[in-house]
Every structure is written in structure tokens, then in C-alpha cells.
Image (cartoon, grey):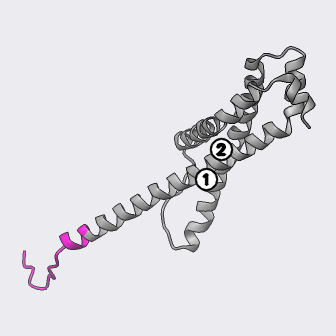
Amino acid sequence: ANLSNAKVSHVLPSAYRRNQVVSQFSLFSIVRAVIMMTVEILIVFTNMLSAVRERRREIGIFRAIGYRRFNIIEIIIVEIILIALASGIIGYLLGIFSAKMLAPTLGIDLPIAFDIKLGYYAVSATMILALLASLYPILSAANMSPDSAINDI
């Protein structure tokens, strides 16, 4: 075949530059995800700590009528799991919806589809992080003495 009009160009340098850009964006995404998880942990920690402090009297009454430490832990863990489950599902769905709406306006032509496996991992990670962030508030609520909690306003 005669290729006299063909134009030859080096593909390797441009492919190398593309791989560098993709790896930099991947690193940026990982750093951003770690920062977001840290912020999530701090928000959950402060919210649960304030919720336990606001409910000191209620927890004290539970302890005074016979609830054991395990029962208090159980009540708070169920609350955390339900809130984290709802938050994870809503966050995942909002993320999918936002990506579908913003991608065309930014000129991004990628298929954005609902992925049940990714949703499961996102919701599971949210629940695990919420439970980890709530360990100290849970233990402080469980170790609260009934008399000091009831008398402390």
C-alpha cells in the first residue's frame, strides 16, 4: 500500500502525558476522599457527643429504672445505624443525580449509571465511619452514673 500522503506522529509522548495527568487526578481524588472522610468523622463525633450530653437526664432515668450499660449502647447504636443508613442512601442517590445533571453542562461525555455494588460500598463505608466516630460518645453514655446524670442539669 502506498502511504505517501500519510502523516506520522509520535503517540508515545502524548500517551505518557495523559497517563501522568490521570495519575495526578487519581491522587487528588484520594486526598479529597480522605479529607471528606475526616470531616465526616468529626461532624458525626461532635453531633453524637452533643446528643449524649443533651440526653444525660434521659440516659440517667434509663439507668435508674434498670437499663444496663449494654442496653444504652444498643439504643445509641441503633440510632446511629439508622441515621447513617439513611444518610448513605440519600448521599449516594444525590451524587448520582448531581453527576447526571452536571456532566453534560461541563462537557463530560461519560455514562453515569446507578451501580448497586458501588452504592452498597458507599453506604457500608458511611455506616462504619459513623460507628467508629461514635465510639467515645457511646461509651461515655454507657458509663454515665444514674444519680449524677439525673441531678446534673
Quadrant in the picture for residue 84:
top right
Image check: 30 left or right of 143? left
What residue appears at the point 80 percent right and 40 percent down from the top-left corner?
Answer: 51
Question: How far apart are labels 1 and 2 at the CA level?
Answer: 15 Å
Q: Quadrant of the C terminus?
A: top right
Q: Main secondary structure of the magenta part?
A: loop
Residue type, mark 1 in image: Val
Which residue in the structure is indicated by mark 2?
Answer: 88
Tell me if 22 is positioned left or right of 34 in this view: left
User: In the image, is residue 9 part of the stretch drawn in magenta?
Assistant: yes
Q: Quadrant of residue 142?
A: top right
Q: Amino acid at mark 2?
A: Gly
Callout 1: 10 Å neighbours few (<14), some, many (20+)? Answer: few
Residue 39: numbered disc: 1
Look at the numbered disc 1 and give the secondary structure of its residue. helix
**For the point 18% across and 69% down, which residue is it?**
12
Quadrant for residue 7, please give it: bottom left
Which of the numbered marks, if any, corresponds to residue 120?
Answer: none
At label 2, counting other C-alpha atoms closer than 10 Å, the crowd grade (few under 14, some 14-19, many 20 or more) is many
Depth check, mark 1 against mark 2: the one in front is 1
Magenta region: which residues? 1-16
Of the numbered discs 1 and 2, the one sitting upstream in the chain is: 1
